[in-house]
Each structure stands twice: as C-alpha cells, then as structure tokens.
Image (cartoon, coloured by chain):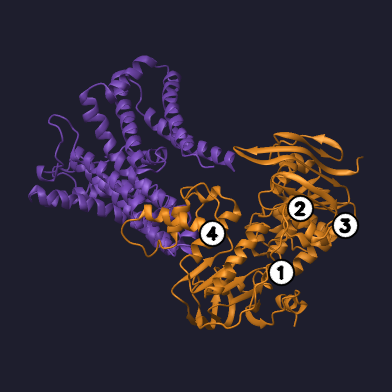
Amino acid sequence: MRRPDARWGISAATVLVIVLAVMALLLAGGHDIRGSLAAMWNGAFGSTYAVLSATLVRATPLLFVGLAVGLAFRAGVLNIGAEGQLLAGATMAMTIGLLVGGLPRILALPLVLIAGAMAGAAWAGVAAWLKQRFGVLEVISTLMLNFVATYMISWAVRGPLQEPTHVYPQTVELSGAVRLPMLIAGQRLHLGFVLALALALALWWFLTRTAAGFRVRAVGASVDAARSAGGIDAARTAALAFIASGALAGLGGASEVTGVTFALYEGISPGYGYSAIAVALLARLHPLAIIGTALLFGALEAGAAAMQRDANVPSVIAVVVEALVVLGVLALDRARSRRMS
Amino acid sequence: MSDTALALRAIDKRFGATTALVHASLAVRRGTLHAVLGENGAGKTTLMRIAFGMLHPDAGSVEIDGAEVSFSSSADAIRHGLGMVHQHFTLVPAMTAAENIALGGHGLFRSGDVAAQVRSLVERTGLAVAPDARVSTLGVGAQQRVEILKALARHARTLILDEPTAVLTPRESEELFGWLRRFVAEGGTVVLVTHKLQEALSVADEVTVLRAGTQVLTAPAAGLDVHALVRAVTGEERTRPLLRTRLATRGPCVARLVDVSARDARGVVRLQPVTIECFAGEIIGIAGVEGSGVHELVRLLAGRLAPTSGSVMLPTTIGFVPEDRLRDAVIETFSLTENLALRDAATRGGRMPWPALEEHTGMVMRAHNVRAPSPATPVGALSGGNQQKFVLGRELEARPALVVAENPVRGLDILATEHVLRELGDAADAGSAVVLYSGDLDELLPMADRMFVMFAGALREVPVNRSAVASAMVGAMVGAS
C-alpha cells in the first residue's frame, strides 16, 4: 500500500522540475541559457571558493530554519514564522553580543548563541501561547509576527542599537570574542555550519529514537489517537515542539550575525525563513534529508547571486523556483494521495 | 423500458496488487428493495462505487434501465437517476439542511427558494427534516434523512444505501426501512448494502451475496433463512454458537462511579449524576442511543473524560477499544510496532526500545491472529477486521483490570465479529471487568452478565433476557416507560 520510494520519487521529480523551471524562466527573460547556467554553476560549485564561501555559507541558515520548520510540521504545528524567529534570534544575539564582547570567547560566544535560541523560542512562544489561550491559528500569528520582527529590526538599527555616528541604519560590528571561528583560512565557512549539521543529526535521533520524539510524531500524525490511545498531552507536546522549533530558527539568526554579517541591519535575512518551508517540504520533513535540500537551495541561491553578477540575470529567479517547489511538492503529494484512496 | 433498473455485469476491478472484484454481477429489478450482503472486503462498497460512477471498472459493463452507460463521475450517475447515501455522510456540518441539499445544484442560490423546495420535498416524501437546522446540530438519523433528501432533490429513482443502519438506533432503523418500503411501493428502487443478515431478510425483496469479489448467491429473500445466508457469506458452516456461559461468581469491584456527571466537548451536560460499579470477571452491557450520554459514560469509565462532579475510582490499567478506530485508536501511517508503542507513549522516557517493541508486536499479532505482512506494515494497509484485532490485542495484552469497548464490532464481518466478542469473553473469564457498549442489542444480549440502559443522561439497570431482544429494553432506550 504505502510505497516510500514513490514519495521520494516526488522529491526527485521536483528537483528535475527546478532545473526545467530555471531554464524556462531564462528563456522567457530572453537570456543566454548556456551562459547563465554556466554562471550559476560556477557560482555554486565552480571553485573551492564558490563551495566554501558561497554555497555552504548560504546553506547554513537554510539548514537551521529548515530543521525548525521540519520539527514544527512533524508535530502538526504549521509554523511559517521561522523568518521572524530567526530575526528575533539575530537581534537578541546582537544585543547580547555587544554587551559581552569583552568577555573571553569561551564564555561570550555560547552566551550569545543561547540568547539567540531563547529569543527565537520566545518569538514562537508568543504564537504558541496565543494558540493555547485563544485558539489563534499559528499560520496567521507566526506570519504576522514575521512582520513585527522585521520592523522591530528597522527600529532597533535606527534607535537603541544604531552605530554611534548615527549615519547608517545598522549596528557596530561584533568584537572577535563573539564571532564564530572560521573553519578554513581564507574562506567564509564558519562553525555554524558544523553546528547545524550536528543539530540535524540530533533532531533525527530525537524523532526516531527517543520517547519524547515519538510523542511529537504521534501528535503530528493524529492528535486524537495520540490523546486517546497514548494518553499523550497533545497540546503540551505540540507547544513544546513549537517552542523548540523557534529556538532552532533563533539559533540560525544568531549564527548569521556571529558567523557572517557580524552586524545587524535591515535585510539581514533574504527570506531564509520562507525558503525553509521549501527546504523542509522537499525533504519530506526528514532531518537528514533536510541537510541535502538545504545544500541544494544554498547552491541555488549562491548560483543565482553569481548569475546576477556575471550574466545579469535577476537573482529573484531563485525565489520563483523555491515557490514552485512548494507548490509542486504539495500538488504532487495531493494528486498522489487522491490516486491511492 | 427494461425491467432492470440497475445492472452490473461481469465487473472486474483491481487496486494495485489487490483484486477487489472478479466477474461480479448484480441485477436490481425496478420497484424492489435489493440487499447486497458480504463480509468486509467482499467488494460490496467497491461494486457500489462503480455503479455510482466513483470508480471505473477494469472490465464489465454498467446498465441503467437496460441501456449500457459509462460514467466518468458520480455527476453522470446522478443524471441517470442514481443516488447514493454513503456510510460516512458527505454533509457540510456548518451549513443548514437546506443548503446541503442545494449543494451541487446550478444557477443562482436563493435561500428562501431552496428552503421552500426542501419543505415541499419533506412534505412529499415524509422524511422529517427542518430545512433551517444546522447539520452539526442534527442527530445521525436526521443527517441520514438529509442525505436521502439530497439524492431525491436530484430526482434519484434508484437509491444506494451503504450500511445505513450502522449508526442508527433500532427505532430509527425501523423508521428508515418503513420509509424505504414505501419508496419502493411507489416505484422507486433501493440497493441496500449491509452486513446484517437478519435485517436483509426482513426488509429486502431480493438478496445478492458477494464473497471474495464474486457474486455467490442471488435469490428472493422469502426463500432464504439466516443459516443459508451465513453459509453463503462465509463459505463455511458455523458450528459454535456465540453464547457466553453465565457468570457464577464475580470478583471484587474494580471500578466505581458515584454520583458522577459530565459534559460533552461542547459543554452540554450529558450525564445526570450516575452511579455504577464494575466487578472483576463480569461483562456489563450498556445500551443507549446517540446523545443519551452513553458516549460520555463509556469515556468516563475508560478514564478518557474528566467528570464535572462526583467521585471516580478506576484501576491503573484500563484497556480501551474506542468506537472510531482510525481516529482514536491507531495512526494509519504508523507501523504496527509504532502503534503498539503508542499505548505507553505518555509515560515512557528516554530511548525507544524499538527491537524489543517489534518483537513484542510480533507476539501480539500471533496471539490475536492479526494478519499483516510484518510488524513494520502501516496499520492503514490492514483490513478493518485485522486493525480491530490488533487494537484489541494491544489493549488486552497488559491484562487490564478493566476493559472498555465501544461498539467494538461495528462494521466488522462475521468472522472478525466472532473473534472480537470471543476475546472480550475470554478477558472477562480471565478476571477483567468488561464494559461493552453497543448500538446493537443483538450483539449485547448474548454477552452481557448485567445490562444497563442510558436514556437522557440517566442510567437504569435492566434484567438480561438472553433469548430475545426484550421490547422493554428497546423501550428503555427510547425513553418509553
């Protein structure tokens, strides 16, 4: 009856669709397909620098938020607010980073990362509380909180966190003590990538091997059966998964400011939290597969940036493709389940 | 015009590796009530879905009034005068009865016109439904009437009803059959899909039995008896009568509710203060209609509902077999092993001992005759009977002091029903207190040591008369004194 290979087939087909969609978009825009694709390939994989300083650096925040969305969706929580949780994490990490920048790194850096995770958790916690207390749908509350977070940063970098000259809408740069170490000299790849990989493994282990992870999956698959047959407190389990999801996204934000930007400004995230939905869905919410899809989308975004630079093709092409992926996975999945029933 | 209202000839249908129908045929004469019988998985519903244009046959033909048709959707079937009432209703709960009936119509929607149409339809057919009532506030019987009206509003001359009495009280069933007989007398045609043999014999003109996807018997109901039908349905002689020997001595009290009242999910008080004691080794039969509070009583005893007042004493281990298996008992996409693990999921800590759980699942499968390829098989891939045997196995396996079963054989075929009831009897013999709720008195009476009837939130003990369904008991269920 259930053929897992068929479900993965959908993901594979979707990847193929990505390639075709990119080509169709290029064609529609009147661009030179070969030249554009070559620029894209070179930007993503063409050199050691492309891989270690573009693709993997882009993939890192996608992995954090992809795992965040994956965990929430597995628990049946439609958290589409990873963007806001990431921004909250980035803001808090920056704030704490400026305060503890004078401490030794071994002390300061964990503090900053934990602060980011906690801020993301709190941001998700607001939506979790609204759901628990008033029955507000998390799809709406998390989406709205994304805007709140975006404008909160706009205010912060023009107000309390603005650099001392008050010229630029951004913070000063973080001191070395609160920067994530680079993994390879001369490349931009930082420790956050390793941290994200470890979290993917940990999340996979948690979901498949632990009793608490089993409860999360059960609640996500059927609230009624989890409650009635398992005696599980479904609301509490879902709320905890929701908050943990926010923590993962918040950590992603902390990893960005301490590993890549070293400062806070508007547009610090080009919509990682939204791309995360495509990353998680294409991976069928499987933590290890999310590593693969995060790398794929990291390459896509890095490649699109290079294509804009070198072939003058707008990089929004990556956003279009991501949206197509979400629609494609959802539509094919629905079509498949209709055929099966 | 042909004498045959609906005919399915030599239908083949496969789903992947599963063969659902092999040369299945059915001919329904106009102006008759034709019962289609068979075990679960015999192909009844598949055949009806083909007749109603919801599925395409791989081979064979469908004829309406003697002319061959090819339906590409149920809309085609409706245009040809067919109407179907599904086992699980297809109504929009948030909309009124009239709005539901108007669904699928064309052109402008004027709620006044629609309500008037429905009112005249109600008058003409005698199916009592308030057009302005929200479907979510209607009882099951009334929802079924809305379904029938929906079909009639589209000028259905042939009605297909899939297990219509599964959710009805005895009185509602009687009313439905009375109405169906009148519909047939006025020239309508009815196809009644059921697994209740007695019901088919008493109400149908003709009976067709399907077994393993093939028609094995078609005959006038008048010339048949239950034994002949059982033989045709199961393909074997039944020897063991399912009569539990009466309990000699009962054990200690294992569960006690004293002056307990409760509200349902919407906050409506469903139980007047109710008192009941359950003793080890006995089977308590509970009867009651939908909305009588029986549902809340059962959930209280199962420890799945908190009382609003009164004192509740329950044992630490309770086995619970809920009515809606796929909603409350198992997770379809999870494997058998994972579903077994569900039982202790709330209290378990640390890591999941999957290998041990898998072995354990294999044991439960063998002990309770659950037919599935392996413990890794998703529960959704099992037949309803095997799913229920698995749920029962999981719940009984810890030897709970109290077993609460809510309509445990609803929708099951004869063999699975027998298996489930026998296991419940064995559990009582082994010292569990068993609470058995069923909408079907025929099912309860041979099993119960004591009988209770719920009506309007009040619980009343009634004497057990195993030989026949006492009319007094039916009366108690519907509030007659």
Earlier-in-chain disc, 1 versus 4:
4
N-term-proximal mark, 2 vs 4? 2
Visual hue assigned to chain A:
purple
Near-viewer residue (A224 or A249)? A224
* Nearer-the-camera pick, A311 or B70: B70
Instruction: Specify the subunit that label 4 lies on.
Output: B
Marks 1 and 3 sit apart, C-alpha to C-alpha, by 23 Å
Answer with mark 1 or mark 3, whichever residue precedes in sequence. 3
> Label 4 is placed on what type of residue?
His
Q: Residues within 10 Å of mark 4 (few under 14, many from 20)?
A: many
Look at label 2 and name its amino acid.
Ala
- Res. A264 in view: no
Are the residues flagged by discs 2 and 1 from a single subunit?
Answer: yes
Measured in 3D between alpha carbons, the distance from the residue under mark 2 to the one under mark 4, in whole angstroms, is 26 Å
Q: Label 3: which residue?
A: B223
**Going by the image, does B407 lie left or right of B104?**
left
- Residue with the mark numbered 1: B442
Residue B232's disc number: 2
Which callout, 3 or 4, points at the residue further toward the start of the chain? 3
Circle 2 chain: B
Q: Which residue is mark 4?
A: B368
Distance of mark 2 from mark 1, alpha carbons? 21 Å
